Image: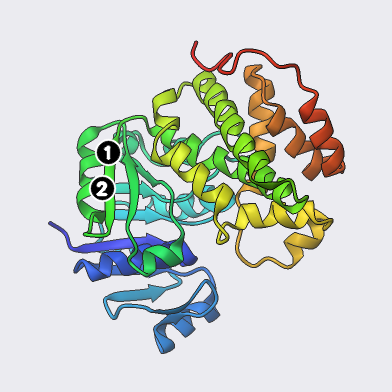
Amino acid sequence: MNKRIAVIGAGSWGTTLANLLADKGYEVKLWVYEDDLCGIIKEKRENTIYLPGFRISERIYPTTYIEEVAEGIDTFIIVVPSHVVRSIATQLASFLPPDAIIINASKGIEIESLVTISRILREIFPERFYKRVATISGPTFANEVSLKTPTAVVAASEDIRIAERVQEIFTTSYFRVFTNTDLLGVELGGALKNVIAIAAGISDGLGFGYNARAALITRGLVEMMRLGVAIGASPQTLSGLSGLGDLVLTCTGDLSRNRGVGLKIGKGMKLDEIQKGMRMVAEGIRTVKSAHDLKRRYKVKGAIIDETYAILYEGKSPREALKDLLEVKIKDEFEGVIQ
């Protein structure tokens, strides 16, 4: 077994996964986008920007050069914001060995193409890698995993052997990894839940209480399932760790960046103002647009997605959006979920 792994991306989640793997005895090459941050990690053994307060293992070797990261590596973990996956993967493609495994740990849907991250990778990497792409996703806050609190996630690949390999790589006594072959469903769950988290944050920011939040989470899951089924995902996957599990965490946790964006909007801040003050990416801001476009493409109902889009991209008042949401015609609870 090759005990060397590359982690592409040194945000909070990439750094956390690198540390987890280093603790398991892997030698980890960590690709860092920012020159200054790379220097800080080398000198202080701490990611002071994205994961302050946690020591970075001596088994982690940071670099800003893709070709240096890829040397001698057959397992690559991509943990960069969704809107830069295409450009980073293009740089990486020429350095992949024939037996490489590519593990996506990012969450999002590309705005321009409306495809998930594994589909982006398939467009860029040669066909021989199609079945060697996996995604790891689930309800995770980087800080809590770094503290080694109990966490459960899912590793998905269309080839169960690759999913089991990812399970083997990541599983620890506190980080439990289940497997799934519904790669599309796992990725959609990890992306779409961020849309509902922004909506839940807006509701909380308006002071509407726990009843309203619970309703948004539950009805939001229905919208996720409708859209997921229309695209080709299993509704069972969306009721699992990468769907419902991640949805609950992101809609309720104080560490959620997407819920935090919604909270500020609900309290009267404008999106532009919020984004100017953010260094870390809230994927849901972009995914709201992707989800809205996908909903129209597949002609599925999704009032929460519609109203969240109207607030973020059309300047609609959050209170007016809630009023319109409450006036949506009431029908069967699970209409349109199973086709």
Question: Total number of numbered labels?
Answer: 2
Q: Do the residues labelled 1 and 2 touch (CB within 8 Å)?
A: yes
The mark that comes first in sequence, 1 or 2, is 2
- Give the alpha-carbon distance from disc 1 to disc 2, as whole Å: 9 Å
Q: Residue furthest left?
A: 1
Residue at image location 42% in from the left, 62% down from the top: 14
Query: What SS does tag 2 mark?
Result: helix
Whether 283 is drawn above or below 40: the answer is above
Q: In the rendering, at what x and y percent does residue 317 appear? A: 87, 43
Left/right of residue 302 with respect to residue 229 in the rendered view: right
Query: What SS does tag 1 mark?
Result: strand
Residue at image location 38% in from the left, 68% down from the top: 146
Whether 314 is drawn above or below 226: the answer is below
For label 1, the crowd category at 10 Å Cα-Cα, with few meaning under 14, some 14 to 19 and many 20 or more, is some
Amino acid type of the residue that numbered disc 2 sits on in the rendered structure:
Val
* Residue 185 picture quarter: top left
Residue at image location 45% in from the left, 67% down from the top: 143
The residue at which mark 2 appears reads as 166
Whether 9 is drawn above or below 130: the answer is below
The residue at which mark 1 appears reads as 179
Front in this rendered view, residue 150 or 38 = 150
Q: In the rendering, at what x and y percent does residue 85 appear? A: 51, 50
* Residue 275 picture quarter: bottom right
Left/right of residue 211 with respect to residue 205 in the rendered view: left
Front in this rendered view, residue 34 or 65 = 34
* Residue 280 picture quarter: bottom right
Residue at image location 80% in from the left, 24% down from the top: 327
For label 2, the crowd category at 10 Å Cα-Cα, with few meaning under 14, some 14 to 19 and many 20 or more, is many
Residue 242 shows which numbered tag? none
Q: Which residue lies furthest to the bottom in this view?
A: 43
